[in-house]
Image (cartoon, rainbow, N blue to C red):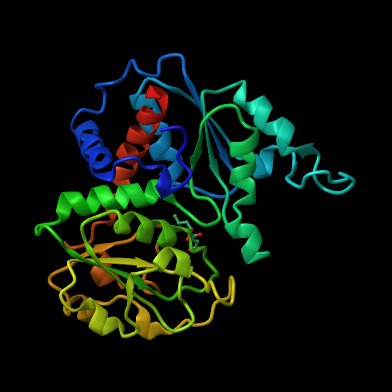
């Protein structure tokens, strides 16, 4: 694996999942692999799970880690080619990426959608600038339009908890007060498209994801109907793709409740976290036996570990 910024960087998903599960059983089996290697993690945005699980994954492989909250502590970066840097930005990504590459063997970056323009976000200007100018492999810790480490985690978790060979997986939109990225939902759809599952997406009208990503996936506007027979309910809020970055609805009827979970085939409840209780999902669902959110967050470590291992081996 040369980098991991996209689900398309995965070579063979089933093998990657099996290897992650093997690492989970024996996390220190490769503790010598990354001796004297360094991971730099740059955060343009907040993080809890991603930061700690990726750091733990690196340490399990014997790797050193340097973390920087680049928005607060670094120079403001310029990404435009040929710009006259008279305003805020002190340093161009051309230098920054090459400089940082000299200090590490893998460079991981979190950079959320800016919501200034759909085109800009979907061009992945920030992470692609690092891919272009860095001289070490890049790992996405969530970029403008994707969260591939979370999606790999979710595929691992579904593999662990499925009890039929082709489970029905429902990605359900849920309300949220803020405009959130489409990143988690996009990567989840992409990874499910590589998996042996029946995927259904449910959301209010106006919340259709990028049609290039959801091509061929069934969309059901009636949430209750979508939930029928589901084995996994994966919940996430995202803002509109069509009316880019807008919150079109905060309809409480889309919140995940115990009554809705009862429409399913005793489905497991999944969410990437952080989650707003009693807005996205009720306490009863989140605190139920069927909620897998804590197990998902544990798998973040092994998703990151298998990705770092693959990158370091190639
Ligand atoms: C991020 C998102 O992409 O939706 C990160 C998820 C892994 N989530 C948030 O920004 C939630 C923020 C909030 O205020 O609830």
- Where on the picture, by quarter, is residue 234? bottom left
- Residue at 34% of width from left, 69% of height from top? 216
Estimate the x, y position of residue 302 in percent, counting from the top left.
Answer: 30, 37
Residue nearest the observer in this picture, 218 or 309? 218
**Would residue 73 be seen by someone viewing this image from the given angle?**
yes
Front residue of 313 and 240: 313
Q: Residue 64 appears at what percent x and percent y?
A: 46, 22
Q: Is residue 150 above or below residue 311?
A: below
From the viewer's perspective, is residue 244 above or below residue 34?
below
| Residue drawn at point x = 24 percent, y = 71 percent | 284
Q: Residue at x 33, y 26 (%)?
A: 60
In the picture provided, is 218 more to the left or to the right than 180? left
Can you give x and y, in whole percent of width and height, for residue 97 in the image? 66, 32
Say which of 246 and 59 sits in front: 246
Across and down, in percent, residue 198 comes to 22, 66
Quadrant into which the C terminus falls: top left
Instruction: Say if 59 sits above or below 10 in the image.
Output: above
Q: Is 295 left or right of 182, judged from the image as shown?
A: left
Q: Can see residue 272?
A: no
Q: As displayed, is residue 33 above or below residue 18?
A: above
Instruction: Name the side, left or right, on which 168 lies relative to 303.
Output: left
């Amino acid at each position: 694996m040369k980098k991991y910024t996209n689900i398309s960087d995965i070579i063979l998903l089933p093998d990657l999942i099996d290897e992650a599960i093997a690492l989970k059983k024996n996390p220190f089996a490769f503790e010598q692999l990354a001796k004297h290697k360094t991971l730099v993690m740059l955060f343009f945005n907040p993080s809890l799970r991603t930061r700690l699980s990726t750091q733990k994954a690196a340490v399990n492989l014997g790797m050193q880690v340097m973390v920087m909250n680049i928005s607060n502590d670094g120079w403001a970066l310029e990404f435009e080619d040929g710009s006259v840097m008279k305003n805020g930005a002190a340093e161009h990504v051309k230098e920054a990426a090459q400089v940082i590459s000299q200090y590490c063997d893998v460079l991981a970056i979190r950079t959320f959608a800016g919501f200034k323009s759909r085109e800009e976000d979907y061009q992945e200007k920030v992470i692609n600038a690092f891919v272009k100018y860095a001289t070490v492999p890049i790992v996405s810790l969530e970029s403008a339009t994707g969260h591939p480490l979370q999606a790999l985690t979710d595929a691992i978790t579904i593999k662990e908890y499925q009890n039929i060979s082709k489970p029905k997986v429902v990605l359900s939109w849920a309300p949220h007060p803020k405009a959130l990225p489409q990143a988690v939902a996009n990567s989840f759809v992409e990874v499910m498209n590589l998996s042996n599952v029946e995927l259904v997406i449910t959301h209010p009208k106006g919340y259709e994801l990028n049609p290039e990503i959801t091509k061929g996936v069934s969309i059901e506007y009636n949430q209750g109907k979508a939930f029928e027979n589901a084995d996994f309910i994966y919940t996430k809020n995202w803002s509109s793709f069509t009316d880019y970055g807008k919150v079109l609805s905060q309809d409480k009827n889309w919140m995940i409740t115990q009554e809705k979970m009862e429409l399913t085939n005793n489905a497991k409840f999944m969410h990437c976290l952080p989650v707003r209780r009693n807005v996205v999902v009720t306490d009863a669902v989140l605190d139920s036996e069927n909620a897998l959110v804590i197990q998902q967050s544990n798998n973040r470590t092994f998703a990151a570990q298998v990705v770092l291992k693959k990158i370091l081996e190639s």
